[in-house]
Image (spheres, rainbow, N blue to C red):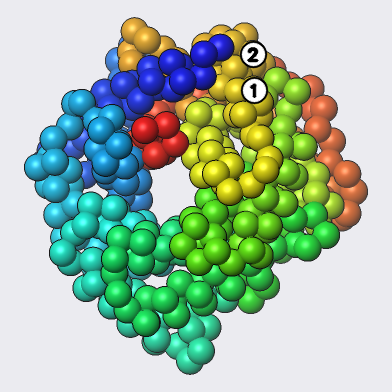
Amino acid sequence: MNLREYADNLCELAELGLKRTYLPEAGLFCHRESWTSNGSMRLEGVSFRYSAIAVIGLLVAQRNRRLSKWTRPEIDTIQKSLLDARHEVSNLGDRGLLLWALSEGDHPICSTVLDEVREILDAEPNHRMLSRLSALELAFLLTGFVVYLEKGGESRQAEEMCRLAYHALVSLRCVQTSLFFGVSRSDISIQSLRRHVSSFASQIYPIYALSRYYQLTAVPEALQVAQDCASRLVALQTSAGGWCWQYDVRRGSVVETYPLYSVHQDGMAPMALLQMEQYTPGDYTQAIARGMNWLQRDNELGCSMLDQSRLVIWRAIRRRGPSRLNAAILLNSLLATLGISANRNVRTGFTLVREWRPYHPGWILVAWS
């Protein structure tokens, strides 16, 4: 496979996909585009998070002169819609994405959004709120601070918040396995009972955020932690190139392989590994290429995840049937909770998840533009 040529095709598809999933009346992107039984595609919902990620991708592509189907005024309109909607968003990870999206575009209101994040964090003594955030939320927040500072945002408070978010994220790392716990030790929700079961997103976003933090600060620990986690993920990649879904952080093993998501293959993994590869001696090209080959035909269904006729990349391959899927995941999660190696050979068929979400083309543009 010519990786660069294939990536160029993905970027063109990403731009077209974002055109199709944009909702002019909302000024934002939909939550998902799904395939209906009559063969048509239907747009559903509105997503602040996916819209922020889409804007980040469009701005990165524009900066690198790789954007051909979107104009800056169109992107500015989406940024304005995000700003108008931000007061309805309480998730600090999403606030981090907004800061990232605005900073990427040198928006004049970046400092205001930063101050709003600071006010939320200052609401509790010693910024205790950071200790309750998930790995994903901290990664988004940390990247938002980093990009703000990289773009010339001058603020000792921004530097301090960046440093605090970094330490909060690193504290979620399991030293023995180099993987990240998805939620913090102070989380008292029902989800915390499965704290040691963590997703691919809870690994790959921290790798990206820590690589960006290293780029800004040259703190050796940040790069080492990112590299160690990446090495573990590569070691656990399936023989066909799939990036597995859930991991047992304590044991450093896979809990559940499926669903295998296309965005992990062509967007999130390349985005993080290519960013980190700039500063490490490791070569992740083969792992990335295996992941991209999985998209073409080297997967459980032997099909291409790219549907050129609909200009879409299908979302995932999952176990067939919701009852079998839930039983397999529940069994593996229970085994991991009891400290028993998960059964990764649950015998089920597989099926295609026929939908596409706007964050997917956003991350493709960040990774390959």
Residue type at mark 2 is: Asp
Q: Quadrant of residue 1?
A: top right
Q: Are marks 1 and 2 in contact (CB under 8 Å)?
A: yes
The residue located at (29%, 69%) in the rendering is 153
Question: On screen, 126 above or below 112?
Answer: below
Q: Is residue 346 visible?
A: yes
User: Between tags 1 and 2, which lies in front?
Assistant: 1
**Residue 220 horizontal side relative to residue 312, left or right:** right
Amino acid, disc 1: Arg
Q: Give the quadrant of residue 98.
A: bottom left
| Residue 258 placement (x, y as % from top left) | 66, 32
Q: Residue 286: name its quadrant.
A: top right
Looking at the image, which is closer to me, 357 or 147?
A: 147
Q: Residues within 10 Å of mark 1 (few under 14, many from 20)?
A: many
Question: Percent x, y for residue 197?
Answer: 71, 53
Above or below, 368 against 156 in this view is above
Does 162 appear above or below 238? below
Residue 135 place in picture, x, y as percent: 57, 60
According to the picture, the residue beneath numbered tag 2 turns out to be 298
Q: Quadrant of the C terminus?
A: top left
Q: Which residue is mark 1?
A: 290
